[in-house]
Image (tube, grey):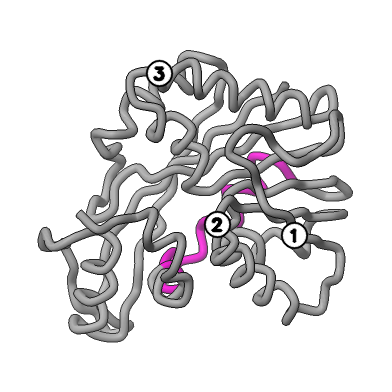
Amino acid sequence: MPDLKLIYQSEAERYQALVGREDYQRNLLPAILSADSLEGKDVIELGAGTGRVSCLILPHVKNLVISDISYHMLVYGRDRLAKLEQKNWSATLESHLALPFANNSADVIIAGWSFCYAALDSGEDWQPALEDALAEVERVLRPGGKLILIESLGTGHKYPQAPDVLVDYLKYLDLHGFIPDWIRTDYRFKDQEEATALTTFFFGEDPMPMWETDEGVIVPECTGIWWKIF
């Protein structure tokens, strides 16, 4: 299995090459906006990475602050946003211990494929660590604010199949008032060589289901979206 922490610290361009081919059917933005319209709202994005979600939601928000614990990723995402016409955004480095935001400063917090690490990086103490992270979210959100989480429900799958490492975490969300939904976010690559190179880079050497179409090589993926009002 690739060292994901090393990828997040040093492989932003290659990572973007992968996620830039994700969700070719463009299901993600409508699903996010179904959870919350974002219109007229101050939004904070945690774990923004290379700006995969940031670039989608920026036109829909009043103000966006992107953040990440990886300076390498944050700079890449910041540079992508800087190329857009909208100027209603800023960027800040996250802390491992506490969110660098004032109390009651956001209407919506969104985290794509990142909030799970509050649990995954904490071993047997994952539940207290997750509850601490959620308490920080509640501190930063205004009353009635919303947390939107996006997590993997299986790359290489046509129907939801949560990765084993996420099962307990996702069960916790379901048991603590989060509203779930799921979509397909399939990847489309130009050919099998590109598909194999990029999926192996991030997901490892196990063969990934894929098929050729007139549009390119498709790798199926399911993505879950959970939201909760605080």
| Above or below, 178 relative to 74 | above
Q: Are marks 1 and 3 in contact (CB under 8 Å)?
A: no
Q: Which residue is mark 1?
A: 91
Residues at marks 2 and 3, CA–CA distance in whole angstroms: 23 Å
Residue 125 has which mark? 3
Q: Is residue 24 visible?
A: no
The three-letter code of the residue at mark 2 reads Ser
Dot 3, how many residues are within 10 Å of its Cα: few (below 14), some (14-19), or many (20+)?
Answer: few
Q: Secondary structure at mark 2?
A: loop
Point out the tag, 1 or 2, that comes first from the N-terminus: 2
Which residue is at the front of the view, 133 or 223? 133
11 horizontally vs 72: left or right: left
- Compared to residue 173, the image places residue 211 above or below, namely below
- Does 129 appear above or below 150? above
Residue underneath mark 2? 70
Which label's residue is closer to the chain start, 1 or 3? Answer: 1
Viewer can see residue 179: yes
The magenta segment: 19-37
Residue depicted at 68% across the width and 53% down the height: 93
Query: Label 3 amino acid?
Result: Asp
